[in-house]
Amino acid sequence: MADTEPMVEDTPTEEVAEVEVQEMSVLDALKEVLKKALMHDGLRKGLHECAKALDKRTARLCCLSKSCDNEEYTKLIRALCNEGEVHLIMVDDGKELGAWCGMCSLDEEGEVKKAVRCSCAVITDFGEETHALSILLDYLKKQAEE
């Protein structure tokens, strides 16, 4: 009986871990993927860097802020994404995108104190394979099929 007790205890903890992993939203996954790309030097921020990466066809994923008020800016990024067949994800706020890209200052607790607005970010290298990346890629496949 002692042999079966540890198996019973291990099974529920594994199920709980799987449930926690599956509850990650697409924006949470995007946030984690952007941070991993930043750590692996695979993140380009701003119009100039993003346009160069999209034009060279090294971009894998593009994030554009919905709050970008320059129409020519958004047209250029959308056109370069369409030309290079790069997935485009729209983010609600530019300050939020800037914080996700590491363009912010943090307080003692690790919360964002001040963030710089970023209208566009491009991932050229995802870094390592994570669960967040697989969630994001699955979401992009579903969007491409529609």
Image (spheres, rainbow, N blue to C red):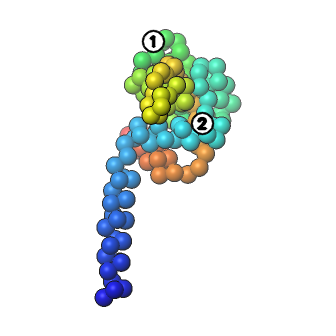
Residue 90: x %, y % from top left: 43, 28
Query: Tag 2, which secondary structure?
Result: helix
The residue carrying mark 1 is 69
Residue 3: x %, y % from top left: 36, 85
Residue at screen point 41% across, 40% down: 28
Q: Nearer the viewer, residue 3 or 96?
A: 3
In the depicted structure, whether residue 50 falls above or below residue 34: above
Badge 1 density bin: few <14, some 14–19, many ≥20, Cα 10 Å? few
Q: Amino acid at mark 2?
A: Leu
Question: Could you tell me how far apart the alpha carbons at marks 2 and 1 are, in whole angstroms?
Answer: 26 Å
**Image quadrant where one finds the N terminus:** bottom left
Q: Amino acid at mark 1?
A: Asp
In the depicted structure, whether residue 36 falls above or below residue 121: below
Image mark for residue 77:
none
Circle nearer the viewer, 2 or 1:
2
Residue 15 appears anywhere in the view: yes
Residue at screen point 34% across, 86% down: 2
The residue carrying mark 2 is 38
Residue at screen point 50% across, 47% down: 133
In the depicted structure, whether residue 122 falls above or below residue 141: above
Q: Nearer the viewer, residue 33 or 71?
A: 33
Residue 7: x %, y % from top left: 35, 77
**Image quadrant where one finds the C terminus:** top left
Residue 46 appears left or right of 63: right
Quadrant of residue 6 within the rendered picture: bottom left
Residue 57 appears left or right of 130: right
Residue 96: x %, y % from top left: 44, 26
Query: Which of the two discs, 2 and 1, labels the residue nearer the N terminus?
Result: 2
Q: Residue furthest front?
A: 108
Quadrant of residue 103 within the rendered picture: top right
Query: Tag 1, which secondary structure?
Result: loop
Residue at screen point 46% across, 24% down: 113
